Image (tube, grey):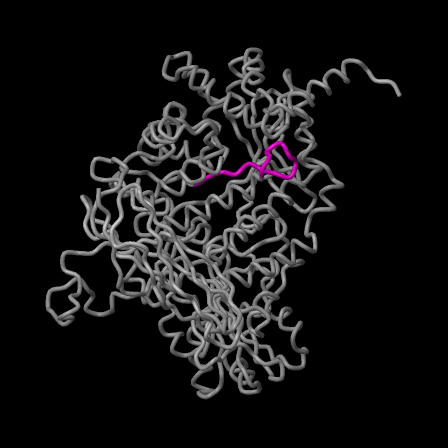
Amino acid sequence: MTFKIPSLCAALIMVITHVHGQNYEAQVDALMQRMTLEERIGQTVMYGGGWDKTGPTINTEFEKHIADGNTGAMLNVYTAKGTRALQKIAVEQTRLGIPLLFGYDVIHGHRTIFPINLALSCSWDLGMVEQSSRIAAEEASAEGLHWTFAPMVDVARDPRWGRISEGAGEDVFLGSAIAKAYVKGFQGNDLSANNTILACAKHYVAYGAAQAGRDYHTVNMSENELRNVYLPPFKATIDANVQTFMSAFNELNGVPTSGNKFTLRDILKDEWKFKGFVVSDYTSINEMIMHGFAKDSLESAKIGMNAGVDMDMMGEVYRKYLKQLITEGKVDEAAVNDACRRILLTKFKLGLFDDPYRYSDETRQKETIYKPEFLETARHIAAASSVLLKNDNEALPLSKDQTFALIGPLAKDEYHINGNWGGAGDRDGKSVSIYEGLLEYVSDKAIFYSKGCDIESEDQSGFKAAIETAKKADVVLLVMGESYHMSGEAASRTNLKIPGVQPELIQAIREAIPNKKIILVLMNGRPLNISEEKEEVNAILEAWYPGTMGGLAVADLLFGKENPSAKLTATFPRNVGQVPIYYNMKNTGRPIPKNNPKEDYKSNYIDSPNTPLYPFGFGLSYTTFTYSDFKISAKTIGFNETLKVSATISNTGNYDGQEIVQLYLHDKVGSVTRPVKELKGFEKIFLKKGERKVVTFEISTEDLKFYNAEMLYGVEPGEFEIAIAPSSDFEFEHMFELKK
């Protein structure tokens, strides 16, 4: 065998540098010395493609920009064949052959679709979160993708906001832990491996606090609130080595976040030392004009780059105006160089300079997509993400010996079940409906089906047939909820009821069969107001949008193959008037006094209880658990000491099951007021029926820190209430003191 000496030398150098950890910075510097200003600006530009049944499509003008070296990344182009074709232009037709980054919204799965992110957070299972994003990365990378725009780590406390479906709910502690798990799953342990993709922490920052729950809307909050609630999950992703950030659409305290130097440069890049790059959300730099913050596209480009946005997604303002702005002295060339360096460094880390086509392998694509083990994992995760909200008189699990009336617009659905941001999942081919899931347990002769109504329709003409169907069967299964486009981006609602005439259909069926068992399965992307429906049915299973294998997962739960274990990560309100409502609010000066709840002047509603319909951390099981024997290692600890607390958890029911044990604290007095409760730990345990286990948590001063009025992060001495509980609905009984 003979070798060409140059190729052998190059290969040898590649091996040596890879083994010893390539000096990427030096390679980036060497490359940038060869780049013109236009080529450096080109790396800050992202254009996008489309998709049809034949594969990826792209504007011919964008292809020219790639060939001219004026594009650093492409959006919405995938498949091994499609990405290879465009990469070939970048590598073989440009002066320096710098490869492209290919990005896509892989939010809760790529081809194999997992439950929506809010649902998956309800599993409280960090291993499952990581596993789902690892599988998503496997599939996405096999189709030529290098980068996902996930995880969304916005804290969200308003169910009117459609994008609550994309995050981990209302809690800072849990949301931060889940954010880390997503990053670890997407990026793996080695970015240079061809089955890992870049994660992107979004939307930076405070997007989840949009006024009135209306997407893209204004956010006004104190820096204290920003640092204590909305920034921690983003900092957690940096601790997990996330490589990219995305600036948000909203304004924050009068400054659009894509032009906010305080959050992007001062906090993210200077205070937190973030070394990756920031991409704008889709045209969010341009939108500073509509915000009234920039007078035109030229000024928006100036503001975006100076603030610290490194890449312009689909806005074209960097390509068109950065050179002019540098010439006019309005943008420092060093800012563009820094942005270019950050982007190139990421491409080196991915190994794209070693082999630009390493992600575009058609054989690997065929071998990876929809692997049976991926689908089986998705089925299990969907079951673990569904929350049992009601189960009166053990209405569930079901018996296979019964007959079933399957009613509702989502009963045979294979389309909405994937939810919003359903990646490249095949909604009509691979997705399994609830009806198909039931067929694994009973024959089609045992199922009587009637649609009843459409999701958002006001037409009640199908009610009569649905009622007759309900009368035929032993048990009625209602599958109802939202259409997938009612949650996600630009999908805010002022009405949190189940849409259309579905509530009326539930009521009509109950009136027709007052003594028959009715089970409600919900598919939706947000907490709903189901106060009335709760009274009409015997059991409620919140399945959210469970994804590709959702129908099978729901059937597994209904028939008891899987025992429900999920617990809510977002509070369910009694009505929309309570919103925003979340468990760790602060006390008013006039809370409801325990010794005199009828006192006239107190902080409550005159037409509704303060309490939610279902609280954060709530979720039922087919078995029961009791908490006992709370122990605390000390009543007083110093700043350098650790406190241990424990409780005994017993499975006192008739089924084996999992319980999510939760640790809560309350800092009674602070230099700034503190929430009434804060989650500070959790553990998911499995107990066989009759089994018990001692669960122990450790508390250090790190768990007690917060930002004070001077924005100093630290801990203050004082009294703390503490509890180990099954949900946030409890009263504190134990206390310890922290002393200097």
Residue located at (62% from left, 72% from top)? 438
Location of residue 536 in the rendering, given as x and y in whole percent from the top left corner? 41, 79
Q: Main secondary structure of the magenta part?
A: loop
Q: Quadrant of the N terminus?
A: top right
Q: Is residue 241 above or below residue 495?
A: above
Work out which residue is located at the far front of the displayed protein and give it: 633
Task: Please name whichever residue, 285 or 581, is drawn nearer the observer in this view of the structure.
Answer: 581
Magenta stretch?
189-202
Q: Position of residue 277 (x, y in %)?
A: 47, 29
**Total numbered labels:** 0
Image coordinates for residue 581, horizontal then vertical, percent: 30, 58
Q: Is residue 219 visible?
A: no
Which of the two residues, 240 or 244, is positioned nearer the viewer here?
240
User: At x 51% / y 77%, what residue is drawn?
Assistant: 654
Q: Is residue 143 above or below residue 382?
A: above
Which of the image's four quarters has the C terminus?
top left
* The magenta stretch spans residue 197: yes
Q: Is residue 210 above or below residue 413?
A: above
- Taking 298 as reference, is 82 left or right? right
Choose between 263 and 579: the one closer to the eye.
Answer: 263
Q: Is residue 26 above or below residue 177?
A: above
Q: Residue furthest left?
A: 600
Res 310 visible: yes
Q: Position of residue 176 (x, y in %)?
A: 41, 46
Q: Residue at x 36, y 52 (%)?
A: 680
Viewer-proximal residue, 502 or 6? 6
* Residue located 52% across and 27% down the image: 45
Q: Is residue 170 magenta?
A: no
